[in-house]
Amino acid sequence: MLYNIFIDPFVQMVQMPDLLVQTLWEGLVSGVLYALIALGFVLIFKASGVFNFAQGIMVVFSALTLVGFYEKFSAAGFSGHTAAFVALILTAGVMFVLAMLVERVVLRPLVNQPDIILFMATFGVTYVLIGFGEMVFGGDPKQMIASELFLPSGSVDVEMLGGLVSFQKIDIAAAVIASVMIVGLALFFQKTRIGRALRAVADSHKAALSVGISLNQIWVIVWFAAGLVALVTGIMWGARSDVSFALEIVALKALPVLVLGGLTSVPGAIVGGLIIGIGEKLGEFYWGPLLGGGIESWFAYAIALLFLLYRPQGLFGDKIIERI
Amino acid sequence: MSLKNWLYALSAAASLTLPAVHGAQAQEESIYVPLFTYRTGPFAGSGTPIANGMHDYLTLLNERDGGIGGVKLIVEECETGYDTKKGLECYESVKPKKPVIVNPWSTGITLPLIPKAAVDKIPVLSMAYGLSASAKGDTFPWIFNPPATYWDGFTQILQYIATQEGGGIDKLKGKKIGYIYLDASFGREPLPLIEQLSKELGFEAKLYPVAAADMQNQSSQWLSVRRDKPDYMILYGWGALNATAVKEAVKTNYPMEKFISIWWPSEDDAKGAGDGAKGFKTLNWHAVGADFPLLADIQKHVVDAGKSQVSGKDKVGQVLYNRGIYNSMLIAEAIRKAQEITGKKAVTGEDVRRGLEGLNIDEARLKEIGLEGFTGAVKLSCADHNGHFSTFVQSWNGTTYEKVSDYIAPMSDKVGPLLDADAKAYAEKNAPWPARAEACDAS
């Protein structure tokens, strides 16, 4: 048994290095996508101190809206690519309207209420979006319009390390797009005036208000950014599977990332996503069979908790020292 | 009591009594058939077409025939989201309305209903899902799971594999067979059978469970498939799991002609993987397509009349829509048989249980229904609540599923004793399990 746990997985890694590379690649792609989902949570938490329970359904809602618009435009005679990009722009518009509605209807009336009230309000947003989404789009799964959005298909197969490592082009695209998006958002919030305002809001609502930062404007911007993140996540996960309400579950994969990386750290979301993505794939592939398989869903939490044991403040959190 | 108070009391009594009388009359004139469905949530992709098929068939009977035997059906959906807790809430909410049958549409929901059914006198129809051993009518008089169990299905797939290997079941010896499944009651159901048969038939079984949370994230499982190199892969999936599994199989370059599923994947599940999915196979026991008089009637009386929830006319005739049709055909025929046995029009759950045991839908009856050639005959009995009927293999051609095998009977010699043992074990585990007290009507 000890051999199977401590020796055999590493023997396998040495004996089949091509599969190790493949596992690391799959983990990397999943990790980048988890980071993207986690980023949606982090953005909103930083700006409003709210854990946005609706982030998962926003992924579904944006993807369904995109496909729904596309179907309408292609039925109206637009060509595939034109319809897809018009649909993409309109979907971004819908996410902006959603951000405004959330700010007006949910956040603004609840200013200064305890965080738990705001958290519960995001439950409300979730169920409204589920109901509205099902009413408009139905429950049927839909195909993501990947090729219409010029997302590649097929694979790049590379012979290496005595085997064949397959890189799916859609996965490469997902990793690149997610990375660009993450870097773009990080730069936006670090280097721009709005970004500085966001950080001020994150530190203290009252202090930010006192220097003339519009809380409402920041909330709209942040919810819109989270909406765009949800849209990209929906496109990428939808292309890997299908566009259905099952996508909502994917958002759960971000929770161990948040446990590990913290709710307030953008670098934490990125590095946490990669650690969880790669860790769970290695765990499932090499150690899963010892435990009957299917360990991925809880193994991610085990990794996060193990890290917290040694670094309770999370990956990038500061050690809080309070004098008493 | 003053006159005024008497008048108040009388009017209050009248107001309480009149609806009760009216309700009793309504009950006398109608048959309540709740449908547990899931048009929402992660499994809606599978649940919606089935719900549409079930609902449309029963709506047709109301619209075209005025119900069954002149009695209108009250059809009411309860949304379970494929969630066991919600399913049980649905059950409790419909119970006071005296349903004549319950269709849980989830193995997870079916299992806790098994002990309740006999107490509440409501038969449970778990059509080709649920507890395989509930086929034993002597132990489970209130549970019905025609036309085949998950265990039957597994042996049918094994036999198909043996045929592909050019011979009898002995050809499985030394083969490596992968089993990828939803890690829930449904997917775990055949595990005891797999363990037993792998020993008896000499094949190596590799298990790849997929948690519901990872349905759309199966790369680890398919990496393991790539490492283990199973000769064949068997899929027991539901909802988004099926679509993702087909996509991952294509991505892994797994030979699709060796990837065979139990009877649940839909057209959409295969379509998403593009041309690479051609050759993907599933079991089935009924036709695909809308070229049947009954489906034409549904189109005319239900879909065209705006009484269906299908999102497009092309959805009528798809594999899971037709599965819903088949399910409602069993319901309707059981009610009809119950009316015939009892002579009553407004039958009860107890009557419909008898109707299910006496169910005998032969070729002539299928023709009358408007489903000639749609499926094989169905005959149940007091002892056999399943029938263990043959299924065939269908293959995805890029547009639709095509039948590619003859009908394959389950390996009853292997499954039968295991079902007996499992039913016995269930009764012992749930002691004191009531001995069958229900009389058996001569069929």
Image: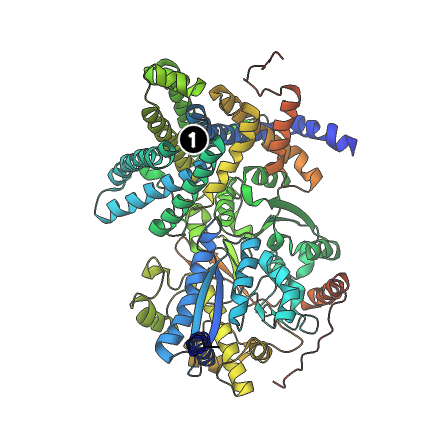
Q: Say which residue appears at 61% left-offset and 53% top-offset.
A: B187
Evaluate whether residue A114 shows in this view: yes
Residue A265 image offset from top left, x and y in percent:
49, 21
**Which residue of the protein is positioned furthest toward the front in this rendering?**
B2
Instruction: Give the image quarter of residue B116.
Output: bottom right
Residue B115 image offset from top left, x and y in percent:
66, 65
In this rendering, the answer to whether B93 lies above or below A88 is: below
**Which residue of the protein is positioned furthest toward the bottom in this rendering?**
B343
Kind of residue at badge 1:
Ala
**Which residue of the protein is positioned furthest toward the left in this rendering?**
A77
Is B108 in front, or is B9?
A: B9
Instruction: Say which quadrant the C terminus of chain A sits in.
Output: top right
Is B22 in front, or is A178?
A: B22
Q: Say which residue appears at 63% left-offset and 34% top-offset.
A: A299
The residue pinned by badge 1 equals: A174
**Which residue of the protein is positioned furthest toward the top in this rendering?**
A323
Instruction: Give the image quarter of residue B378.
Output: bottom right
In this rendering, the answer to whether A314 lies above or below A93 is: above
Residue B46 image offset from top left, x and y in percent:
47, 55
